[in-house]
Amino acid sequence: MTGILIVGAGTVGSSVARALDQEGYDITIIDQSEAALNLMSQNLDIRTILGDASDPLVLEEVNPDNVDMVLAVTDNDATNILVCQLMHRLGLEPNLIARVRNMEFHRRKSEFFGTDEKQIPIHSIISPAQLVTDEIIRLINLPGALQVVEFAHGKIQLAAMRAEHGGKLVGHKIRELSDHMPNDDVRVAAIYRSGQPIIPKGETAILPGDEVFFIANPANLTRMMQELRTIDRSVGKRVTLVGAGNIGMRLAEGLESFDLRVKLIEYDRVRAEHAAMTLNNTIVIHGNATDQYLMTRENMETMEVFCSVTNDDSVNILSAMMAKWLGAKRTMALINNSSYVEMLESTQSGIDIVISPNQNTIGRLLSYIRSGSTVEVHSLRRGVAEAIETIAVGEKQHSSVVGRRIEELNLPQGAVVGAILRDDEVLIAHHDIEIQSDDHAIIFVAAKSLKMISEVQRLFEPNPLFFH
């Protein structure tokens, strides 16, 4: 069993611990808050250590034989980096992964981190804020999408969308898609109807209200979205952001490179002034986004996207609900509390998209933790579903899928191959495509379990009976 040490029982650390515990990993977590550790130990099968992880004496309490990976995910960059350095100095050699918020470290990653004795011995750094920023930008650029994730460095995308009356394919069978899009290859990976997954076949009809997951290259995404609903091409041109914190500033800076009219509302005067001086093409407003007078004055009825990303869940919820009530077409709210996420997604809250930064982080960490052929993992639908990029191991150690057609793969029920990346060519999955050595397969798992994920991994990992 893989042993994982998590440093930090805050929002990120506790969410990661819950997700990894469900997958059967051996978890140890260190934090200075006894209350936080007690709460976690009551609900999870994990070991807890009370103390400051930057203290070598605390780290020495960890059994090195039980640790294969360290996830340093406190809110403090310096602590996370120091923990990894201390683990290395103490002679512990697991994979070291640190949460680092300062983007200068990410821009100069090869300079600061590596195996050279002058570098910091960290194998990977992650930025939950950047993961969230990238997701929101994809959502703004794809009006109507509920979720968009990328594989193969952006060559393949998986999107989720709600089918509505007016979509050309709505009310029709999936096999008719090729008649509507004869030159564009798209794979419908799964349908969720009333929250229950359906693995689609050619005879499956798409009904209004269905949540449809489909895989395509980026050029075909918008075309497919028109099959599922009527697309307002003006959506996304006028954007209001709330919060000039870490995520809000990154979002504003990222959106300035697109042809968008962006406003940023910030309650704190100092932050608002800093944002106004830093941003080039964003209108910065000092004010309270839960103030109806301010929101009315800023013409929410003309706003095509409203996105609240402060560090206060209640502000994000209330401001997004108010914006929707005042006429904003599409509202998004950043929510850290997982119980809020589930509640808002299951009720008519007026919030179109609930964004959970923890799900982004969990997916990225699973990409590092999963052994063998796994390249990328995206956690979907609050962790119920998952999309995986995995490699069919090459000539020297064939996996059992090499040389077999997709229809011959013994995938567990509920797992679907959506696409293949072969060299630089994207092949949308069809039953007769034969898997070749070193193909990257994109697999959608509609209702994941530990057993199902293990079966998928085992298929693509090296075959111990193969001799070259």
Image: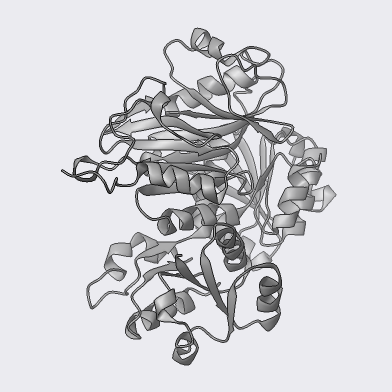
Q: Nearer the viewer, residue 34 or 260?
A: 34
Q: Residue at x 54, y 86 (%)?
A: 52
For residue 19, above or below residue 118: above
Q: Is residue 345 visible?
A: yes
Q: Nearer the viewer, residue 435 or 271?
A: 435
Indicate the position of residue 451 as horizontal and vertical percent values.
53, 48
For residue 332, above or below residue 310: above
Location of the C terminus (image quadrant): top left
| Residue 200 appears left or right of 165 | left
Q: Nearer the viewer, residue 373 or 126?
A: 373
Asked which quadrant contains residue 94, the reply is bottom left
Please give the count of numbered marks on the rendered protein.
Answer: 0
Asked which quadrant contains residue 89, the reply is bottom left
Q: Nearer the viewer, residue 58 or 406?
A: 406
Colouring: one colour
Q: Residue at x 29, y 45 (%)?
A: 463
Q: Is residue 260 visible?
A: no
| Residue 247 appears left or right of 333 | left
Indicate the position of residue 379 as horizontal and vertical percent values.
55, 48
Indicate the position of residue 322 as horizontal and vertical percent values.
81, 45
Quick one: which residue is furthest to the front in this view? 465
Indicate the position of residue 357 as horizontal and vertical percent values.
59, 55
For residue 300, above or below residue 89: above
